[in-house]
Amino acid sequence: HVNIEKEELLGVLTYIKVDKSPGMDGIYPRILREARENIVGASTDIFVYSLATGEVPEVGTKHKLIPLFQKGSRDNTGSYWPVSLTSGAVKLKSQRRKGQCI
């Protein structure tokens, strides 16, 4: 059984990097940070349910891989760096897991 405390998630939301792009859900990290007091309860419930049942909301399963040009010839595939866009919720879940491993 995995337990997630609201205070723990609130801490992650407080220090989320706001200069990042939105993920596949279209939600900007700045919105998550600014709305943290209003969304922490529902977000915690969703994470607890997801971890307990193994079910992931559909938005959590979608990722978009985009090529980001670095340098060199634009015709050379080696000149691009793959960047993965994921939803803000998935990023929060990942941040929580990183905190547990430390």
Image (cartoon, rainbow, N blue to C red):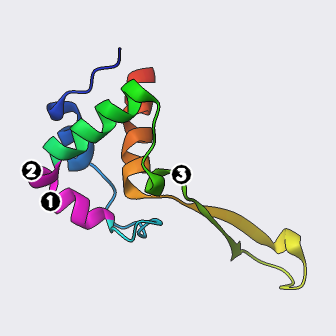
Mark 3 or 1, closer to the camera: 3
Q: Residues within 10 Å of mark 2 (few under 14, many from 20)?
A: few
**Above or below 14: residue 2:** above
Question: Whole-Å distance between the Cαs marked 3 and 1?
Answer: 23 Å
Task: Give me the residue at 23% from left, 38% from top.
Answer: 44
**Above or below 98: residue 93:** below
Q: Amino acid at mark 2?
A: Glu
Observer-nearest residue: 74 or 51? 51
The label number, if any, that marks residue 61 in the structure image: 3
Question: Whole-Å distance between the Cαs marked 1 and 2?
Answer: 6 Å
Mark 1 secondary-structure assignment: loop
**On-image quarter of the C terminus:** top left
Observer-nearest residue: 78 or 6? 6
| Quarter assignment of residue 96 | top left
Question: Whole-Å distance between the Cαs marked 2 and 3?
Answer: 25 Å
Q: Mark 1 near mark 2, Cβ–Cβ under 8 Å? A: yes
Task: Give me the residue at 28% from left, 21% from top.
Answer: 3
**Above or below 70: residue 98:** above
In this rendering, position of residue 11 left or right of residue 20 = left
The label number, if any, that marks residue 37 in the structure image: 2
Q: Amino acid at mark 3?
A: Thr
> Is 40 included in the stretch rendered in magenta?
no
Q: Amino acid at mark 1?
A: Ala
Check disc 1 and report the residue beneath it. 35
